[in-house]
Structures are given as C-alpha cells and as structure tokens.
Image (cartoon, rainbow, N blue to C red):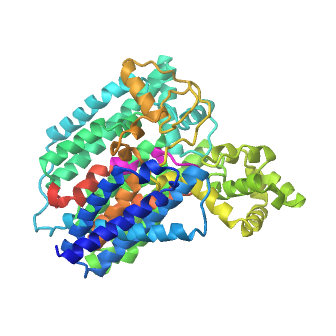
C-alpha cells in the first residue's frame, strides 16, 4: 500500500470513529466512551480494514460501489434513528449534524463492506450437484436433532404453550371459530389437544403430542436442509457446524417446542426458499421432476395458509419472478411454471374459504391490518389531544373508545387495537380514513414516530425486546425483557422434569441475559439478523447470482410485511434463524464449497 493510501485510510477511519458516538445517540457527558482506549483500538482496526479495501478492491465496479454505499447509508441511518427511539421515543428531525454523521460513517462502512465482499469473491466452478443423504443418514440426522431437543422438551414439559395458543384451542373446544387466526393451525393445534384430552383426560398430554408432532416435522425439514447442503457439496465441517447450530442454538429449540403458528410457518417458508433456489438454479431439471414441483406447491401452500402475510409476500415474489423474465433468461415452459406458481395461491384461497364455510367462522377483525393507523391516531391523541375538535373526538371514540387512547404504549399496539370497533369500521370506513388523514396533515412527524416505534427492533440491532414490560401473564409479569413467551398457558400447566434447563430458558426469555455477552448478543437480535440478510442479498446482486438473491427475496418480503405489525418479536422473523445455515453456506461459498 502506498503512503498516500495509508494516510487516506487512517483519515477515513478516524472520520467514521469520530462520528460514531454521536450517531448512536451518546452525549458529550458520556465521556467514558469518547475518552476510551476502546475507540482507539477500533480506529486501528478500521484503518487496517479500509487500507486493505483501498488496496485490493476493484473500485471500477460501480455496481458494487453503489450497492455497498446504499447499504452503508441505510444501516447508518437506521442506527441513528434507532438510537433516538431507544432513548427518547421519538426521532430528531432536521438535525444537520446527525445527517453529516450518517454521511461520514457511511463512507467508512461502505469501504469496509466492499473489502468484506472482495474477501468472499470466488468464481463458481462447473462442478455439478452431488448425491444427497441415503435414507439411513437422513433418519440419523433427524434422530440427532430430536435427541438434542429432547432435554428442552422435558425441561419445558409439555412445551411452550403461548402466543394465541389458548385462544386457538378454545375455538375448537367451544366450536366457535374466527378467521382471526389461520384456521389450518387452529384445527391442527386445537384438534390434537382436544382429541387427546377427550381420550386421556389430560390437556398436558394433548399439548405434548402436538409438540412431538411439530418436533418431528421440524427435524424432517431440517434434515432436508442438511441433505440440500450435502447435494450442493458443502464441506462436512460446515455441515456439522450447521447441525450443531440447529440442535443447540437456543432460538431454534425454543420455537421448535413452541405452539405458535410462526414455527410451522417458518418451516414451510424454509422449504420454499430451498425449492426456489433449485428452481432458479436448474429450471429445466426442476420442472421435469413432479416430486420437486409438488414440494414447491406444498411448501408455498402451507406458508400462505399459516400466516396471512405469507400470501402477500408470495404474490409480490411472483411479480419479481415475472419481472426477471423466466422465458427470456431461462428458456422454460411458461405454462407449466405458471401453473406451479398459481396453484398454491388457488389452493390456499380455496381451502380457507372451504374451512370458513364448513366451520361457520366469523370474519376476523380489521385491526390487524390497521395496526399502523390505529397507533398513529392514538399517539396524536396522547401527545396533542387539543388538536382534535369536539366533533373529531366524538368520531374518533366511535372507532377507538377513550379507554383505548389511555392504554397507548409506544412499542405495543395490542392494548389499543383490541378495543377497535370493527362493526363501526365496516359501516363507515371512509370516516375513519378521513379522520386519520386530517390528523396526519398536521402531525406527520408523530405519525412517523408512531409507526417506527412498533417496528424499529426489526432493523435496529442494539435494542432490547421489551414491548410487554409490565404486562401480567398467567405465571409471571414481564420485566426488563420479553424476548420469548416462555410459559405454559392454561389449560396446560408447566411440569418441568429438568429444572436447571427450564431456568436457563426462563432467563433467556425474561431477563437481559444473552444481551450482556458481546458478539453473541447480536446472534439473538432480529435487527442484526436482518442486516446480515440484507448484506447477503446485496452481495448476491453484486455477483449477479440472481438465483440466490430471488430465493432469499421472499424472506425480505416477509420482513417488509412485519414492519406493519403490532410490535417487534422474534417469532415474526423466525426464518432468519431457520435459514441461517443455508445463507451462510451460499454467502461464504469460497470456504464452504457450496456449488
């Protein structure tokens, strides 16, 4: 490296380090950070990285430069905005110094990102996909996973029965159904619990039977993922590491043993990602295999049937695939592909309509789709009630009673939206939207704050998931952390057979435990996992590996839908952990051997 590049790398890295404390919301009073050898060490390390980047990276690749700069700017902006929301519950608009800091840090980060990408660059060889697991090995992988999850099952027996599970079981027990929760999952969970209770007289046994079924489904699908890695010639060492991750990383077993619909939804989405990649990688072979086509249709069907936002994400994915131009780029049979793409949509819509009619299910409320505008109106009323005239207040209380306004908490919409009057909205939706528009004209900043505060944990890595702080549950009250629901709700009761392990998962769920461990804490963060996926997506586009980019596009589309959700929870983006071994294998193919 020339002396000029050395000086420039030191200057650029110093600029990034200098603005970092202000970017993250630290004030001048917190001198323990600025007057610290930690930032000196960070400056040295960043200087080395930037120096290597300036020396090794091909800066004539404008496409890669722009992608890296875009991701760096987006990340820097999110860190600045997230720190505002974390400390003050509102964004500081119009702060020129903050904008300058974002720009300065983005330059340093973009250079580092280009250097990281250059280290991963490799020219894919012409090696063909190899053989997968034998049936015996397939079963052995399943057995290993089940044995590793067994202690968690015994520790949490009959399992983590939380997150709407009680409502879903009650629908079956009372024969009163609603489209609020996916009926497919209601019938599966509630049907098993009710049937076992009727035969054996034990709700715990019914919950345990459901958990065992879900464990087997997860083990089968994860074994399929391991088989996918084997067929794509991923080295044995990485496959062993991936198996260890699936077996022991706490997020995986805690949700494999959780009754929430998000577990099966994420498993189906994982299978869809794998099938999408194989479809895009070798389209002719995929369309020539009925087994693969059936796998694609089934995974897409279950994904859309187990969460309503799965349907929206899949429809947008179809548009992206169409825009990519299959016929021109891949030379495939368009008619056969169109049938395969549209069939799961038709099956999902048809099955939902059939179950609705057969079960006489009442329509679900609109409050889930209206979470963002509901919270925006509630925040305006809470911060500036005088901005509503007497007539507007009267109209507002027709949709959201005053009690709902008093329940407003910035991070969680449930206390407010549960009182939303769906009947009134069905009678006069235009009145609601007119009220929302009129209030927003003079409170644009408040609207932005209200929306971002329920979702910023999905893109701000440093936050603590504590939206349920102070809320009383059946066996505990949430405190400093609400990372995971943890408990067994009625009609089940926790009967732990391994108390120390049960206590370990309780601490991970309800206390700031893993967040105190540097580096490891980020692996538990939805915000960090998102940026990992976003960076990987950018790298795939930079490398023109569109088969990989489009395969993982569905996970990012799902992420976009949860930004409109009620709060930030791990379960909404669980796919980030389930698909992590595949993403890592593709991203670091230079080291994993992926083809």
Q: Quadrant of the C terminus?
A: bottom left
Of residues 150 and 245, the one nearer the viewer is: 245
Q: Quadrant of residue 387 in the image?
A: bottom right
Is 476 rendered above or below residue 263? above
Q: Quadrant of the N terminus?
A: bottom left
Is 238 rendered above or below residue 126? above
Residue 203 position within the rendered picture, expressed as x and y whole percent measured from the top left: 50, 22
Residue 558 position within the rendered picture, expressed as x and y whole percent measured from the top left: 46, 57
Q: Is residue 301 left or right of residue 492?
A: left
Is 409 rendered above or below residue 300? above
Residue 386 position within the rendered picture, expressed as x and y whole percent measured from the top left: 83, 58
Of residues 40 and 422, the one nearer the viewer is: 40
Q: Is residue 203 left or right of residue 497?
A: right
Is 31 rendered above or below residue 12? above
Furthest toward the right, the residue is 390
Count of number-bearing discs: 0
Q: Is residue 76 left or right of residue 550?
A: right
On whether residue 577 falls in the magenta region, the answer is yes
Residue 363 position within the rendered picture, expressed as x and y whole percent measured from the top left: 65, 49
Q: In the rendered structure, which segment of residues is drawn in magenta?
A: 566-578
Please give the name of the residue rendered at 33% of the width and 46% of the height, measured from the top-left corner. 519
Residue 287, can we see it? no
Of residues 435 and 321, the one nearer the viewer is: 435
Please give the name of the residue rendered at 32% of the width and 38% of the height, measured from the top-left corner. 249
The prevailing secondary structure element of the residues shown in magenta is helix
Please give the name of the residue rendered at 73% of the width and 51% of the height, measured from the top-left corner. 422
On whether residue 576 falls in the magenta region, the answer is yes
Residue 381, can we see it? yes
């Amino acid at each position: 490296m020339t002396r000029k590049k050395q000086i420039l790398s030191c200057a650029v890295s110093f600029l990034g380090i200098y603005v970092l404390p202000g970017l993250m919301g630290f004030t001048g009073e917190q001198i323990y950070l600025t007057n610290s050898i930690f930032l000196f060490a960070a400056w040295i390390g960043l200087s080395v990285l930037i120096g290597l980047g300036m020396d090794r990276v091909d800066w004539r690749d404008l496409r890669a430069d722009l992608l890296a700069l875009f991701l760096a700017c987006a990340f820097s902006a999110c860190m600045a905005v997230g720190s505002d929301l974390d400390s003050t519950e509102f964004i500081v608009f119009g702060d020129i110094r903050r904008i300058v800091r974002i720009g300065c840090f983005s330059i340093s980060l973009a250079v580092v990102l280009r250097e990281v990408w250059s280290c991963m660059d490799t020219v894919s060889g012409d090696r063909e996909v190899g053989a997968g697991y034998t049936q015996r090995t397939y079963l052995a992988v399943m057995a290993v996973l089940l044995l590793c999850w067994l202690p968690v099952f015994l520790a949490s027996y009959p399992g983590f029965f939380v997150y709407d599970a009680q409502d879903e079981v009650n629908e079956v027990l009372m024969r009163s159904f609603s489209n609020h929760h996916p009926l497919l999952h209601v019938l599966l969970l509630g049907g098993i619990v009710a049937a076992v209770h009727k035969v054996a007289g034990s709700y715990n046994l019914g919950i345990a039977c459901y958990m065992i079924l879900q464990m087997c489904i997860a083990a089968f699908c994860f074994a399929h993922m391991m088989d996918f890695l084997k067929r794509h010639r991923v080295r044995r060492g990485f496959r062993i590491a991936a198996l260890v991750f699936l077996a022991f990383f706490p997020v995986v077993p805690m949700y494999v043993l959780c009754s929430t619909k998000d577990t099966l939804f994420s498993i189906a989405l994982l299978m869809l990602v794998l099938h999408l990649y194989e479809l895009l990688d070798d389209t002719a072979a995929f369309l020539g295999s009925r087994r693969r086509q059936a796998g694609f249709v089934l995974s897409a069907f279950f994904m859309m049937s187990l969460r309503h936002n799965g349907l929206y994400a899949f429809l947008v994915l179809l548009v992206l695939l169409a825009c990519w131009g299959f016929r021109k780029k891949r030379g495939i049979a368009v008619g056969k592909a169109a049938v395969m793409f549209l069939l799961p949509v038709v099956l999902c819509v048809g099955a939902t309509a059939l179950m609705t009619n057969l079960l006489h299910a009442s329509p679900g409320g609109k409050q889930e789709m209206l979470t963002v505008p509901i919270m925006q109106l509630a925040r305006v009323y809470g911060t500036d009630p005088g901005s509503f005239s007497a007539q507007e207040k009267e109209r507002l209380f027709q949709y959201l009673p005053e009690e709902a306004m008093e329940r407003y908490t910035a991070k969680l919409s449930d206390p407010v939206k549960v009182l939303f009057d769906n009947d009134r909205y069905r009678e006069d939706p235009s009145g609601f939207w007119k009220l929302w528009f009129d209030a927003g004209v003079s409170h644009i900043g408040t609207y932005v704050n209200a929306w971002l505060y329920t979702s910023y944990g999905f893109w701000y890595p440093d936050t603590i998931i504590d939206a349920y702080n102070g809320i009383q549950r059946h066996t505990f009250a949430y405190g400093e952390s609400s990372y995971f629901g943890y408990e067994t709700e009625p009609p089940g009761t926790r009967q732990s057979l391994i108390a120390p392990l049960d206590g370990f998962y309780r601490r991970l769920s309800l206390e700031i435990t893993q967040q105190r461990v540097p580096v490891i804490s980020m692996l538990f963060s939805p915000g960090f996992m998102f940026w990992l996926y976003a960076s990987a997506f950018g790298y795939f586009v930079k490398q023109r590996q569109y088969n990989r980019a489009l395969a993982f596009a569905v996970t990012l589309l799902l992420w976009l839908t949860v930004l409109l959700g009620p709060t930030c929870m791990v379960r909404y983006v669980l796919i980030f952990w389930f698909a992590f071994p595949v993403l890592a294998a593709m991203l670091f193919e230079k080291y994993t051997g992926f083809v």
